[in-house]
Amino acid sequence: MADEYKGIKTFDQKEWVKENLSYKKDSGSWAWIFHRVTGLALIGYLFLHVYSLSTLTSGRTAFETKMQSFLSPPLLALEWFLFIIVLFHSLNGVRIVLVDWADGAKYHKTLYRFSWIIGIILFLLMGYIMFSHEILKFFGK
Amino acid sequence: MFKLQSTKNSGANSWIMQRISGIALVVLMIGHYILMHYHPDSGHTYDAVLGRMQYSWYRIIDLTFLSLGMYHGLNGIWGIFRDYNMKPWLKISVISALVIFGIAFTVWGYSIIFSIPYLKS
């Protein structure tokens, strides 16, 4: 097939993964990829979240036993890292809405950079909120 | 037999709903994160949950949050599938699986919220 159109790059369906990876990716392409991956992660987490809270129906003891296991530092850190996924999907979602409804196509790259800066600030703020109790306890307050 | 009339459904409704639910979810999600983590006990003890659930408006927010999240997520998965050229039987199967899983987990979530008792004061 490829020989029929000399000089024009044609899509080789058998090599679709390779073809897709070969595209030059700008910030928008990465945003698109990350938006999908984070979205899938979040809906997966929502299913898991409903499941993990189902012990609420079996009363106090069952619920608190389960919740204690989520309060260990590694899992609390994981919950903090989950906020990266939440933040990326949220801020990029806002960026998509602005592109669609507020002529954002003209400034979407600036928006992308700003959303990373805002995201990192909010991530650190959430870290402080989540761990302030431990931090204050560590300093004996 | 399974003929989907794709020309009649441009996807514009699901596109606009995805934006509206998304904007609502940004606010709800960040609020939820702060509320659940401002103190280690606030998201992890039965008393904290029981306390919040005494307010019907809080239950309504939670139910809305769950419904919107489920809708937005599953509509998003469907959006990914729509990027690929699917055979009609596959379309029907994917939509059915998404709707069944979505309804099942939403009903499960609702039943958990409704199972938390109101304390008589």
Image (cartoon, grey):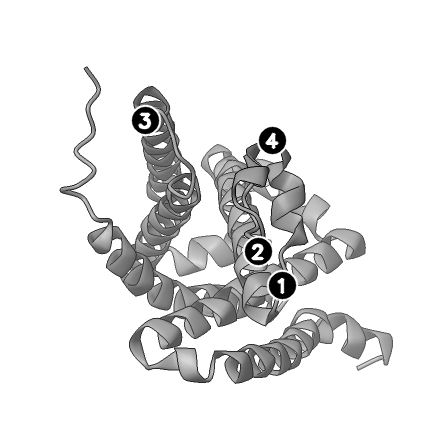
User: For the residues carrying marks 4 and 1, which lies nearer the camera in this image?
Assistant: 4
Q: Quadrant of residue B58?
A: bottom left
Q: Which residue is mark 1?
A: A25
Circles 1 and 2, Cβ within 8 Å, touching? The answer is yes
Q: Chain of mark 1?
A: A
Task: Assign the C terminus of chain A to one quadrant of the image.
Answer: bottom right
Q: CA distance from mark 2 to mark 4?
A: 21 Å
User: For the residues carrying marks 3 and 4, which lies nearer the camera in this image?
Assistant: 4
Q: Is residue B17 above or below residue A68?
A: below
Q: Is residue B94 above or below residue B111?
A: above
- The kind of residue on which mark 4 rests is Lys
The earlier-in-sequence mark between 4 and 1 is 4
Residue B52 appears in the rendering: yes
Q: Which residue is mark 2?
A: A33
Q: Chain of mark 3?
A: B
Task: Assign the N terminus of chain A to one quadrant of the image.
Answer: top right
- The kind of residue on which mark 2 rests is Ile
Q: Which residue is mark 4?
A: A14
The residue nearer to you, when weighing A66 against A86, is A86
Left/right placement of residue B20 relative to residue B38 reads left
